[in-house]
Image: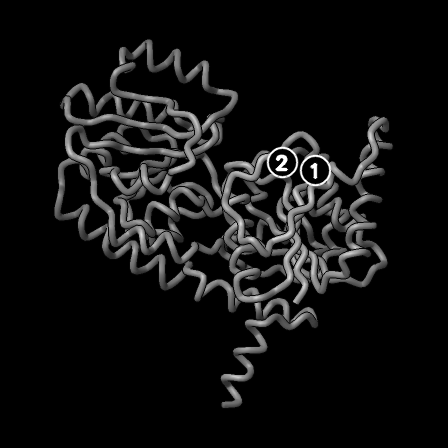
Amino acid sequence: MNIFLLVSSMGTGGAERVAATLVNAWAGRGDEVTLVPTFPGERAVFYPLHQRVRVVHLADLVAHGARGPMRYLARVMALRRLIRETKPDVLVSFLPNVSVMTLLASRGLRIPVVACEHNNPSVDGRSPLWTLVCRAFYPAAQVVTVLTESVVEPFRAMVPGAKNIVVMPNPLPDELFERALMRRPSGGRKRIISVGRLTGQKQFDVLIDAFAAVVRQRDDVELCIFGEGADRASLEAQIARLGMEERIALAGTTESLWDELATARAFAMSSRFEGLPMALMESLALGVPCVASDCPSGPRELTCDGQYGLLVPVGDREALTHALHRVIDDDHMCRELGRKASESMRARYGLQAILPMWDRLFARLGAPSLGEAQEALQRRL
């Protein structure tokens, strides 16, 4: 099967991690895969890719000189030429801006488009303009995927003309679960880790306040926040104001997040909203005890209503402080949470669970994949 996947960039974000996991799995089993980062200002590929994945940066196909709307039109036309040359069986696009460009570029080519949402449109702060754009263009997609059942109705209300809305969770790579078997929390201070862009969505100010309250009662803990973003300066000022420079670190991005998580006492997430948060998924899969805000959407689904992680109300500093105390103090609870979480995540979100869902979706679109063909052969045998 010839699969064409488009994503804004291949930097450090969650959607980029999902893109890498999928294209690697498809290429690894023999599908023909083209990965197209569309954003002109970002060329770095952060996550390792299978050698059979063909990467084409859209910026390389666009002549310099055009500006404004003409520049956008040139990108759309360059993408259309690439699609016609590649002759894919299906187009998979991540995030609204990429999906709209894909729908424009593929118009009339009779190639099915799967437009993938990676956030909750009812709470993600999408502008009225982008809401109208999605409402106008998404009905042209053969399928729109969302990450959880709780997002289906909000999305249907936003885009009433969408033909098919399918729940397609993020997959987790097999090597992540292999790392779970080798997890060894570090000695010394008990380390709490959090991950995400330093923006208001993640509410790291709430986490910093809650953790500072923990530190006032004990000296054997530290907090490390991985990520970059526009709020770095204000968060640094908050840490300094609290006198927590030696206990709270804004560590920037890391190329070895799984290694960092494998030594953590716990993972903490304080977001106002999410789609299906990859850092929380990866922490649960690694068997790291997790504390997460009960935000829309993702944490409740991932922890099975709090069975495999501690949930706290969004923005509740006191509740978050109490939950952090629990994961720091209770060794037995942490062991049980970690073990059960890792087993549950493998069963629900491992590639062996998610790839067949993609294969069935492709088959519905008239583009049977290698996986679907192999499954059909096994049924006949």
Label 1, secondary structure: give it: helix
**Amino acid type at mark 1:** Trp
Residue on which the image places disc 1: 130
| Residue 163, percent from left and from top | 70, 61
Whether residue 162 is situated above or below residue 233 in the rendered picture: below
| Residue 173, percent from left and from top | 43, 55
| Residue 290, percent from left and from top | 29, 43
Whether residue 40 is situated above or below residue 258 in the rendered picture: above
Q: Nearer the viewer, residue 172 or 157?
A: 172
Residue 90 at least partly seen = yes
| Residue 349, percent from left and from top | 42, 59
Q: Which mark is residue 126?
A: 2
- How far is disc 1 from disc 2 in space, using C-alphas? 6 Å
**Amino acid type at mark 2:** Arg
Question: Residue 280 appears in which quarter of the rendering?
Answer: top left
Query: Residue at (47%, 47%) from the top-left corner?
Result: 276
